[in-house]
Image (tube, rainbow, N blue to C red):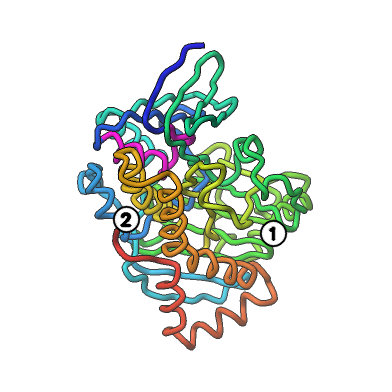
Amino acid sequence: MDSKVYDVLIIGGGLAGLSLACQLAAAKRKVALFERKKYPFHRVCGEYVSMESWNFLHRIGLDLNSVLLPRITTLQVSSVTGNMLQHSLTPGGFGISRYMLDASLAELAKKKGACLFEEHRVDEVLEENNMFTVLIGEKAFTAKVLIGAFGKRSNMDKKMRRNFSAVAQSPSKNWVGVKYHIKADLPAHIIQLHNFNGGYCGISKVEEDQYCLCYLTKAENLRKYNGNIPLMEEKLLSKNPFLKKYFCDRNNFLFQEPETISQISFDRKLAVEQHVLMVGDAAGMIAPLCGNGMSMALHASSICFPLIERFLSNRITRYKMEDEYRKHWSSAFSLRLKMGRILQPLLVNSTLSRPAISFLQNFPLIVNKLVLATHGQSF
C-alpha cells in the first residue's frame, strides 16, 4: 500500500474539520483531511452563523469583511396557523451559504499547508499501538490523532459501531432535511422560523441576492406523501400562511431540485469514542430551530486544537487530552443541546405551537433567556 504519515487525520470537510485543519496547519502540523465531495458544493444547512464566531473566523485567516454579508438581528417565529412572534437577537448573526463558506475555508486550509483529499471516501479505520490508520482504496494514511468530523449521520458511525447508529429509528423519530436557495422579499436583517405540523422551516438571507430556505420534517410526514417533496410542501407546509407565500411561486426557487438529507438523529452522542475526538455534528447535533449548529462546529474546533497541540508536544497524555476535551465540550454545549431537545417537540406540535408562541409574546424576557441559552460568548 501507498502509506503516508501525518500528525493528525480529519475525516469530514465541514466547518469543524476545515477550521481545525486551518489551525493545525498554521501551527506547522502535518494534517490530512478527507472529504467525499469536491468543493464547492451545497449542504443542507440553515446558513445562519452566530456573531460569536466572527472573531474566530478572522483569527484563523478568513476575511469576511471582503464579502457583503447580511447582518441578522431580528427573529420572527410563526405558529402553524400564522400567529407571529418577533424578538431582537443579541448578539445576532450573519448569513453566508455553505457553498461559499466551506469552499473558502478549504482554500485557506490549503494555503496554510493542510493536505485536502477531496472525493475521498474512507473505507476503514484501524487503531494499533496508539496510532490510527485510515484506509482509502490502496492508500493508507497514519497519524497519532484522528478527528471525526463527518457530520449528522455517516457511514463512519456504523463503521465505528457507535451506539446510536446501531438502533433502528422509527419514522416518528427520524428527520429529513430539505434546503433551497430562493429569491425573497424579506428584509436582510430578519431570520424567520415557520412551524408546520411535524417540522419547521427557516428563511434568511445569505450572500448576494439569495435566501436560504431550509426545513426539517419528521420522516413520517414524507412517507404520507409517498416521498413526493413538492406535494408535501403544497399540502402540509403551506398550511402555514407564511410558508404558502414562498411555495406558491416556484419561479423564485434557484435550485431545480432541493438538497436533501435523511436519517437525521438528535440522539445523544459521545465527544470521544475509541480515542477519536468528535467535532461538529459528529459529537452532537443541536435542534436547527436554535440556529447555532454552525457556530458550535467552529467553536468545537477551537476547543480541540490547543489540546491536540499539547498532546503532540508531549505536554499531556492522550488520556488527559481526551478527558479535557470531554469536559470543555460539555461545558460549552450541553446546555444548548438540552434546550434544543426541550424546544423542538414543543414547536413542531401543531396543537402546542400556537399557545406557546402566544405565551412568549407576552413574556419577552423569557424569549431573551431562551435566545441566550442557545448562543454562547465570542471565542
Q: Does the residue at mark 2 contact the one at mark 1 (Cβ under 8 Å)?
A: no
Q: Is residue 19 magenta?
A: yes
Q: Main secondary structure of the magenta part?
A: helix
The residue under the point 31% across, 68% down is 91
The residue under the point 49% across, 24% down is 119
> Mark 1 belongs to which amino acid?
Leu
Disc nearer the start of the sequence (2/1): 2
Task: Find the magenta span and give its range.
Answer: 9-25
Give percent across and percent down for residue 202: 51, 59
Q: Residues within 10 Å of mark 2 (few under 14, many from 20)?
A: many
User: In the rendering, which numbered label is found on residue 53?
Assistant: 2
Give percent across and percent down for residue 54: 28, 55
In the displayed structure, 151 sits above or below 41; it is below
- Secondary structure of the residue carrying tag 1 is loop
Q: Is residue 294 left or right of residue 208?
A: right
* Image quadrant where one finds the C terminus: bottom left
> Mark 2 belongs to which amino acid?
Ser
User: In the rendering, which numbered label is found on residue 345?
Assistant: none
Can I make out residue 262 in this image? yes
Rounded to the nearest angstrom, the CA distance separating label 2 from label 1 is 35 Å
Where is mark 1, residue-wise?
A: 236
- Secondary structure of the residue carrying tag 2 is helix
In the displayed structure, 206 sits above or below 368; it is above
Q: Is residue 285 magenta?
A: no
